[in-house]
Image (tube, rainbow, N blue to C red):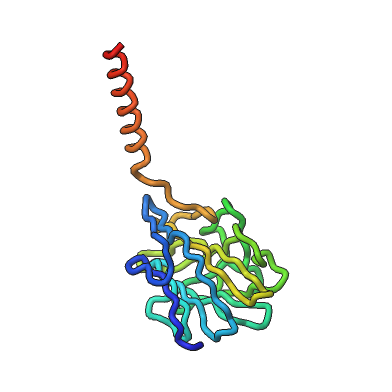
Amino acid sequence: MKNRLLQYSAASATGVLASTSAWGNIQYSGLINLSLNFQDGDELYIDIDGMSTVVQASAPAGADFRLQDYGGDEFDLYRQSSPGGTVRSTGFSIRDFSSGETIGVANTFSAGGTFYNGGTFDNSLGQYAGVAFDSGSGIRYGWLQLQFDQVANTINLVDFAYDDSGADIAAGAVPEPAHAPVIAALLAGSAAACMRRQQKKA
């Protein structure tokens, strides 16, 4: 059905329950799990620095990437606008990154490429597409975690992230809470206070 809208955004969280994280330099979408069924004739658009995604028939403003049907058992990931985003590919195929692999300046990026039946993204989690895009302040590197099911003719965008400093990013990297050391210090102080109270009672 054309113009059927399924959207996730940091501002509204419409359609998907998820939350974004922005601690340190890594900007993280939170779990999205947004599926595109190519039989519906729609495409999946990703505004990576805007932390939003949408499935619909026409491109929204600000989209960096689009996932689209290429055939019965293939789909494409392409930049939506120029300069827009670019994708790490090997020939015409999207290069898959395993968790922890580096995505960054040493990689070669192109306008896009194809996933296909029998590729490493088939029915698998933990496989990442490496992307780069022009933020307006320079090139930023990121990843998209994707799950391709050619039997069901669907692609699932699990989550995504990018480093807003321009540094390389590890596939699957998510931010650590900046306040974690503070919480640890507070817990340690609370434990010490409890011990002092126990000693006074004794």
Residue 192 position (above or below residue 88): above
In terms of depth relative to the viewer, which is nearer, 87 or 39? 39
Q: Residue drawn at (52%, 64%), measured in percent from left and top?
A: 158
**Residue 40 in picture, x, y percent from top left:** 55, 85
Q: Residue drawn at (47%, 60%), measured in percent from left and top?
A: 31
Q: Residue drawn at (37%, 55%), measured in percent from left and top?
A: 22
Residue 110: which quarter of the image?
A: bottom right
Q: Is residue 53 left or right of residue 95?
A: left
In terms of depth relative to the viewer, which is nearer, 56 or 200? 200
Residue found at the very far top of the displayed protein: 202
Residue 71: which quarter of the image?
A: bottom right
Residue found at the very far front of the displayed protein: 201
Q: Is residue 73 left or right of residue 78?
A: right
Residue found at the very far bottom of the displayed protein: 2
**Residue 167 in picture, x, y percent from top left:** 45, 55
Residue 128 position (above or below residue 99): below
**Residue 12 in picture, x, y percent from top left:** 33, 69
**Residue 8 in picture, x, y percent from top left:** 41, 70
Q: Is residue 17 left or right of residue 39?
A: left
Residue 63 position (above or below residue 180): below
